[in-house]
Image: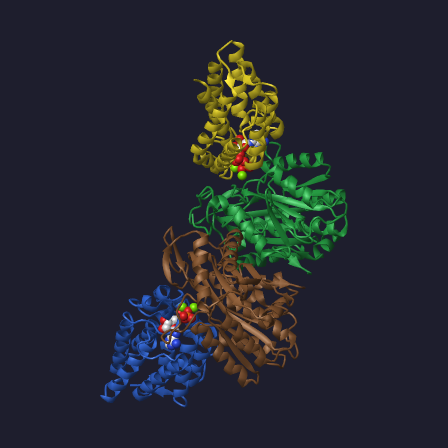
Chain colours: A yellow, B blue, C brown, D green
Amino acid sequence: MTVSTADVLRWLTALQRVYAENRELLTDLDRAIGDADHGTNMDRGFTAVQAELSAHPPADLRSIFQTVATVLIRTVGGAAGPLYGTFFLRVATACAGKSELAAADLVALFQAGNEGVQQRGKALPGDKTMVDALLPAVDAMRNAFERGNSLAEILERGAAAAEAGMLATVPMQARKGRASYLGARSIGHQDPGATSSYLLLKTALDSWRS
Amino acid sequence: MTVSTADVLRWLTALQRVYAENRELLTDLDRAIGDADHGTNMDRGFTAVQAELSAHPPADLRSIFQTVATVLIRTVGGAAGPLYGTFFLRVATACAGKSELAAADLVALFQAGNEGVQQRGKALPGDKTMVDALLPAVDAMRNAFERGNSLAEILERGAAAAEAGMLATVPMQARKGRASYLGARSIGHQDPGATSSYLLLKTALDSWRS
Amino acid sequence: MKKLINDPRDVVRESLAGLAAAHPEILRVCFDPVYVIRADAPIAGKVGIVSGGGSGHEPMHGGFVGKGMLDAACPGEVFTSPTPDQIEAATCAVDGGAGVLHIIKNYTGDIMNFEMAAELCQARGVAVQAVIVNDDVAVEDSLYTAGRRGVGTTVLAEKICGAAAGRGYDLGRVAELGRKVNRNGRSMGLALSPCTVPAAGKPGFVLAADEIEMGVGIHGEPGRERMSLKTARDLTAQMAEAVLADLPFQGGDRVVTMVNGMGATPLMELYLVHHELEQILQARRITIAHRLVGNYITSLEMAGCSITLLKADDEFLSLWGDPVLTPGLRWGI
Amino acid sequence: MKKLINDPRDVVRESLAGLAAAHPEILRVCFDPVYVIRADAPIAGKVGIVSGGGSGHEPMHGGFVGKGMLDAACPGEVFTSPTPDQIEAATCAVDGGAGVLHIIKNYTGDIMNFEMAAELCQARGVAVQAVIVNDDVAVEDSLYTAGRRGVGTTVLAEKICGAAAGRGYDLGRVAELGRKVNRNGRSMGLALSPCTVPAAGKPGFVLAADEIEMGVGIHGEPGRERMSLKTARDLTAQMAEAVLADLPFQGGDRVVTMVNGMGATPLMELYLVHHELEQILQARRITIAHRLVGNYITSLEMAGCSITLLKADDEFLSLWGDPVLTPGLRWGI
Ligand SMILES: Nc1ncnc2c1ncn2[C@@H]1O[C@H](COP(=O)(O)OP(=O)(O)O)[C@@H](O)[C@H]1O
Ligand SMILES: Nc1ncnc2c1ncn2[C@@H]1O[C@H](COP(=O)(O)OP(=O)(O)O)[C@@H](O)[C@H]1O
Ligand SMILES: [Mg+2]
Ligand SMILES: [Mg+2]
Ligand SMILES: [Mg+2]
Ligand SMILES: [Mg+2]
């Protein structure tokens, strides 16, 4: 089983719904250790992505992700904009020439995306950022792939690892981003960006499992 | 029995205490139909009067009231400053040459004070102002005097009439001062200035009755 | 009560000390009695312009003292008129031999204190004339009230009369000009939240979470109605209609507009309201010649805004353009 | 949430439309992408000065666009960094051939978005340099944080760099000057009340009736401590001590001071705080060469204030005096 262009578009459509539904949640998390806008930012960004994709449907996978990246960069702002923008820029490059994604492609693709986030933001695991959800997810997916698991299983492992990574940010002290200004006061709160990153993977699973 | 310079000074000392004690009450009344400062204004004024009287004790009755007037005009501000200032200016003039006040003097003195207030503020009875307490008090004192009542009785009638006049302002619609901006919304509230005027007479009674 | 103050009784004086310290090149503050005066007053041969009123409306009036506007301002206690001794001292201090104009907002206390002061000044041989500003359309005028309240037009009158005095208008002409400004200016305001007089310690009124006071006075006096919060578009339209209908302003008129913040309303919202106002006026073919957007006549930390429109003729517009150098209003210098 | 707005999603654009309408002689606003630009940009041969950041801090940054200060400002959504496409468009639009300086407040989002934009501009052949302002002493700097936040010194850097560019400094020199301003500027603020991002609808934090946040950030970020309200004297002293000790400022220093309102604090209180600050500095024989008192870098309707001190040399002071004509800061023109 592989992921088709249509699957990718379903994923992005689902992401708009998911970030709209979790807008308050993400903003509340950001209120605790940031500036109360992460939910609004993500919602604004993925709503704009949908608008752009339906206005000008791109030809292939690469240009779909290229569009996602530029729209997010243009509309999200804050820290999340350049970070998720870079994520999808790398994903787009990783899709170059592909018309559908096999298990290996998926792993490579999320890995490239996370590398982009780390290069742009210089965050390391444990800094209490989206990297703490993305990196474990990528590792889990790679292991599952190497153990020859199915695409659905790979996505399940990825989402599960992302969720664990997201929850693991609670006891962390932030070392990057706005939350780092709180020093020890950032401990005990779940990181909004790690949460939106978990939703990214969880939604991929839900959209592609079937 | 007559009112001596010492009695007048006791009255003024008592007035400082009375307006300090009723500061919140007068300000709350002014909050309902004005700008929430009448208590503060009266307290500030009569505290300054005491300070001035003890710093430079005036020689005679006239200069005592002259001092009261100029200090009130200088320190009270708002509508009450010029009004009570004019009140005591006229009282001072009415005391010219006197070293103590007999019943007739007292009546004439409060009458002169009220006339000053009316000339300065152009208020008529029923306008919901201090005049609604002062004018009935003056009339009652005059009647009592003409009926040959004692000074204590005259003061009692005056204070009682002032209190009735003060209470009578509740159903009135203000036609002068800040409260008039409320139109019909000023109905149902007791006028702060009528209340401070009642206190003026009530305190004279309490200070001189004995 | 949450304020950046020390003893509430010292607020006015300590704030004035800060005003003086912040603008030594523009003004001085005298403390006994209290008034704010142009650093270079008196100006020989120039009509002096003096205003005043309760404190708590900053930058009005002290912040409008300076070249091209006020020669002196008399601040009373918070929301309480200044006293005759202050006004007398300020008036005599700025008299350059050409007399002094008093610009007074129409409140019983202000009127009576300025009246007493004028009597004292005239006794000292200083010619004084008064302009009474009563531009608030929220309160209906009638024989049975103290009349309309003086609000935003006061700021425009102080600028225009200040410029005229600078050009050498004599006392009679400056006074007539001030009355013309008042005749052609109208204002209306609203409050989203109340304000607290420091000495009182409690809000002057209370509004529910979704309630506003339409037509509020600058001391928190009630206005036309308590109503529920609407969009900036609807609220601006409601204020503008009331102001436009009152003069009335008509198509082809040129106006000076002021969108004024009550104290706690962000500039972002004031610009948004100004945007709505411009569209309303454009639709009626009323031309905006000059505009002010900001905090000019405030009510402590009240949230809300007011709109002032002045129907302008060539004289107003020409005087408006003259240089002005005050803490609150500055251009051309 | 009580605000004078329409749809929360339109606040930034509608407010910018009002800014443009209010100051046509000074600036224009472009909407796709969104930026505020000097009416007469680009100025051939002059280094362009561009700043930007989240909206909600008005007049910063859009209100500082104009002659002698910024050539363009890029407003993001409320409290959210602007995006690279805005910054790229604004930068290219103001480039007069001498390159463009980006003045950036030290927030991860701002840094990353300006970085991406700079890459895009350089690809288009526009020389770009950046000055990062990180002057907030409330947050301890360390290898384990994103570093200190950028606050009040940004305003002073924009004025001084704008004047230098007007005098013909080249890009390298203006950038170096901006970094020198940042090295010599320190700030600290406090909040008496929180503020509400329109799109969020709820306050960013909550304070008890007697509580304040000492060292608050301009987005409502927590500072050094939650403490109970004290007198303006004590609070000013606490902010001043933190600022003075950090550089450190010493007797004999000349400084430019800014007592800045967070949005809902009356000017009366800001002047009172300035009065306290002047006394503290006098006692330490620190000379105030220039002062600002007012709302310059706000946080929506937050109540509170911040203090900024800039240790000034002759170059700063001379540039400070140059004429400036913007909606938020104006003199000499
Ligand atoms: N340097 C960084 N690297 C990776 N992720 C980061 C970094 N800085 C911040 N983030 C993520 O961005 C999230 C905040 O995003 P958002 O609230 O949209 O931006 P902002 O903080 O500018 O308001 C944080 O929860 C964190 O996960
Ligand atoms: N024209 C007037 N004549 C007589 N009394 C008046 C007049 N105007 C106002 N007052 C009195 O003044 C009182 C208000 O005084 P105060 O609150 O100290 O002044 P202000 O209204 O200026 O704040 C009113 O309650 C009323 O009794
Ligand atoms: Mg955020
Ligand atoms: Mg009152
Ligand atoms: Mg009053
Ligand atoms: Mg943000």
Q: Quadrant of residue C112?
A: bottom left
State whether residue C1 appears in this view: no
State whether residue D222 appears in this view: yes
In the rendered image, residue B19, in percent from the top left (x then y), is placed at 37, 69
In the rendered image, residue D219, in percent from the top left (x then y), is placed at 53, 43
Quadrant in which the C terminus of chain A appears: top left
In the rendered image, residue C332, in percent from the top left (x then y), is placed at 67, 64
* Residue closer to the observer: D243 or C165: C165
A1, above or below D115, in the image: above
* Residue closer to the observer: D274 or C49: C49
Give the residue at x 46% y 19%: A208
Q: Quadrant of residue C206?
A: bottom left
In the rendered image, residue C297, in percent from the top left (x then y), is placed at 51, 63
Left or right: where D225 falls relative to B128: right
- Among all residues in the image, which is located at the extreme top? A148
D204, above or below C104, in the image: above
* Residue closer to the observer: B201 or D292: D292
Q: Quadrant of residue C62?
A: bottom right
A72, above or below A62, in the image: below
Left or right: where B162 falls relative to D231: left
